[in-house]
Image: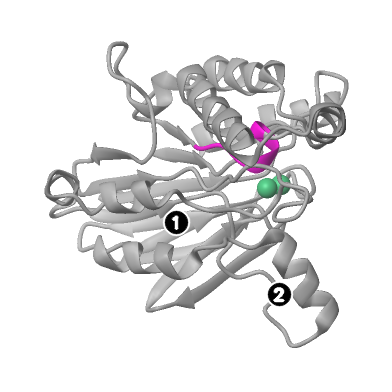
Amino acid sequence: MEKGTVTIAHISDLHVAGKGDRRQLEDLDSMLGHFTDSGVDHLIISGDLSDRAKEADWEIVRELLLRHGWYDWARTTVIPGNHDLTNLEEEMRFYNALNPLPGARDRACRARAASFSRFFRDLVTGDELRDAGFPFIKVLRFPSLKLAIAGFNSVSAWSPTENPLGSRGEVDPAELRAVRSPEALRAMQGCFVMGLCHHALKVYGTDSLLDQAFDWTMELKNRQEFLAAMRAIGADIVLHGHFHRFQSYVLGGIRFINGGSFRYSPNRYSLLEIDESGAYRHHFAVMP
Ligand SMILES: [Fe+2]
Ligand SMILES: [Fe+2]
């Protein structure tokens, strides 16, 4: 990679399902080796590390990151996806048996997000003593550039009426307020600012009723508020996953990049190269 340029690799939606799929784990192993060999500076994984919300899958990802020297606050950033926090079958079984109140489901989902943050604390806060949570702001100081990553949890709790597939998302308004606080804005001053959430702001977005029905099950419910917050913090770019397609689009003057799905395209990843002036080049790269 060019000197003076910061390179960010972005993958998403690994959907690891135990150690049974050896092929996938070998692919991830190769991909991490490729990132090391090609001089990538920072890796971002935008959620759905696990397929069925299992800590054992997070552990598989952690072990591979550790093996390649990527399990380090300055090297890797992760956020959760709906598949990390919600096991649909369990939700439905629990619902049919006990019919818990929506408030209880919200609390359980938040507690699960907290357990994800605790599990990946080394990558989120880089500090044993501080509480990991959302939003988090990571300021990375490269020789040529200061990069701020603002990470959000966009997973909302399963609900039989509002979120029947568990894949609709929402960023807690408290997170969107917190990221605009004077301290947060001060921390990001002079940085290339990158927003990070799991859910897509744009899914199909066509007039077809079938597409619209699908959009509804996948959408980020408060995407306008999220977009307004991204504009307020001066985000240069926003990365996400969830809708398993490699996409790049502009909304409200901000470039959004969907990192696709590593599970379904294990050779492809998103690559950003940012120079010291904040100008960047982006493309979806293919591992040789
Ligand atoms: Fe996914
Ligand atoms: Fe997802």
x then y, percent, for residue 98: 80, 27
| Residue at image location 66% in from the left, 52% down from the top | 242
| Residue at image location 55% in from the left, 44% down from the top | 46
| Residue that badge 1 annotates | 272
The answer to whether any part of residue 152 appears in the image is: yes
Quick one: 225 or 278, which is closer to the camera?
225
- Secondary structure of the residue carrying numbered label 2: loop
| Residue at image location 39% in from the left, 30% down from the top | 133
Magenta run includes residue 10: no
Up the image or down, 136 lies above or below 261; here it is above
x then y, percent, for residue 9: 50, 46
Total of numbered circles in the picture?
2
The Cα–Cα distance between marks 2 and 1, rounded to whole angstroms, is 24 Å
- Indicate the amino acid at tag 1: Leu
Quick one: 61 or 87, which is closer to the camera?
87
x then y, percent, for residue 125: 33, 25
Q: Which of marks 2 and 1 is nearer the N terminus?
A: 2
The answer to whether any part of residue 288 appears in the image is: no
| Residue at image location 77% in from the left, 30% down from the top | 52
Colouring convention used in this rendered image of the protein: one colour
| Residue that badge 2 annotates | 204
- Indicate the amino acid at tag 2: Tyr
- Secondary structure of the residue carrying numbered label 1: strand
Q: Start and end of the magenta stretch?
A: 79-85
Left or right, 281 with reference to 187 = right
Q: Nearer the viewer, mark 2 or mark 1?
A: 2
As drawn, the label of residue 12 is none
Left or right, 13 with reference to 236 = right
Q: Residues within 10 Å of mark 1 (few under 14, many from 20)?
A: many
